[in-house]
Structure formats: structure tokens, C-alpha cells
Image (cartoon, rainbow, N blue to C red):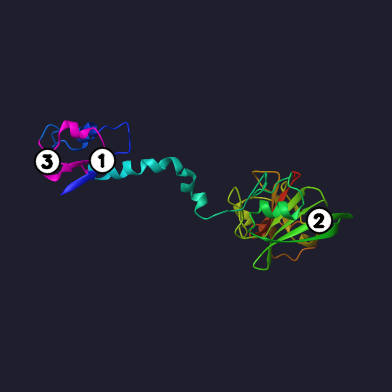
Amino acid sequence: MVILAPLCAPWITPREYLRHFLPGADSNSQHIKADDCESAPFYVEESSVTKVRPLFLAFPLLLAGCSTLSSFSWSSLSPFNWFGHRLTVSDAGVGDINAATPMLESELDKALNGDYRLRGGMETRNGKLVSIYEALKDDSVRLEISGAPKGQVKQVTVMDKAVASEWGVKIGDEFSSLYSKAFGVCQPGQGADARSVECVAPQGKHVSYLFSGDWNGPEGLMPSDDILKDWKVTKIVWHAQGRE
């Protein structure tokens, strides 16, 4: 039986290969002559091998792959590439959407990696015309992006349960897991969210969490901390302008 040992590493000579990995083989023996070890691939008679180190079996395979290392993408080993694109809310924005992103469908679609179907429209808020894009998936609104017409993004509201903040907060998390009290960080919601409570994220002034739950108190007032502790995150909101 003959063992083929291809060498693709120019810095390892056949002599060194034999000395380190075939200690029982003598390059001056009748099977392996010194003159025969000047080029690769070379052959070794199995009968001349009295002891083979375990590494010998794997070493040729490692060398055989060295020619392809230059074209290998090490970034493909990153866990973030195993599951594709994952949207995250940070103090800088939502994924690639930030304060510099124009309110254009093409730009928003690109920033969202084409993961959502966009639907645009207009509405009036506080007497001002606002451009709105809803990002849908499975016919359900998962994000709402708003800003001035022909301007930049001012706010992104996240309802997608698959999207979390960079600090690990996600839809469904309880108030008590993030805050001990509402004073100084929370305020009543606005508009359609008037019966909810919006609280600034502890780690960033541009991110806030909207909490909702059961309460029979009047609209516009804050529930007590005892009531809020069981409320859950229903929306994650990113604001281009930081909140206090």
C-alpha cells in the first residue's frame, strides 16, 4: 500500500515532512532516497513506516486545503450570518434606518433589506402633514416609519415581535424587568396610544418602550407603579430627536 502525501506549503520540504511525521522512515533507506525527496507529491512505502504520529493522517488534508484559504471568507463563520439579516433597534436607529435616511420607499426598502412590503401614505399630526410608510409582513403591520414629506426619517415604531433592542428588550417584556418606578422616565402615550405609557430606555435617549395593560383610570393620567409592574412592552419606538 502506498500513502500519497501532497505538499502545497512551499515552506515545508519533504525532508522536514519525513523527519517530523515519519520518525521511523530513513531518507537513506532503499525505499526513500534523499534524491527522491526534492519534489512533491512523493510516495512512502507503508513497510518503511514503523511509527506514525496521529497528526500525520490529518496533516496532508490540512495542507491540501491551504491553496483555497485565500478565497475563504472568514466572516461566514460569524453566528450573525447563520440566520440572515436580523433587524435591531439601537440608539442610532432601526437597522440601517437612521436620522439621515430619506423618506423614500426605495431607500427604506434597501435599509430594511427587502424583508418587508412597504405601503405609503400621509396623515396630519399636531397640525402638520406627516409622511408615513407601513412595513408589512404576512399582511400585518410590523413597523411604522414616519417623517416630514421629502425629508428624513423622524420616528420608527416597531411592533414586530422578531425585532428587539440592542440591549435585549423585546415585545412582551414586563415593566418590572426594566424599571423600578415610572417617575422621571415615563409619560402617558399620545394619540392612539393615549392609554399606554411611554418610557425612555435606560441605555439610550433615542429609544423608548410603550407599555400597555389593564387599567380603569382616566385617560392622560399615569397608573401607579404597582399597576405598571405587570404591563408589557407592546411597541419599541426610535426617535431621531432624543427624549428626556
The earlier-in-sequence mark between 3 and 2 is 3
Residue 50 in view: no
Secondary structure at badge 1 equals: loop
Left or right of 71, for residue 53: left
| Mark 3 or mark 1, whichever is nearer to me | 1
Q: Residue at x 32, y 41 (%)?
A: 63
Secondary structure at badge 2 equals: strand
Q: Which mark is residue 48?
A: 3
- Give amino acid for label 3: Ser
The earlier-in-sequence mark between 1 and 2 is 1
- Give amino acid for label 2: Ser
Give the CA distance from mark 3 to mark 1: 18 Å
Q: Bounds of the magenta span?
A: 30-54
Q: Which mark is residue 41?
A: 1
Left or right of 152, for residue 115: left
Give the CA distance from mark 1 to mark 2: 68 Å
Q: In front here: 202 or 131? A: 131
Where residue 125 appears, x then y in whole percent?
85, 56
Question: Could you tell me which quadrant the C terminus lies in?
Answer: top right
| Mark 1 or mark 2, whichever is nearer to me | 1
Residue on which disc 2 sits: 131
Where residue 212 appears, x then y in whole percent?
69, 61
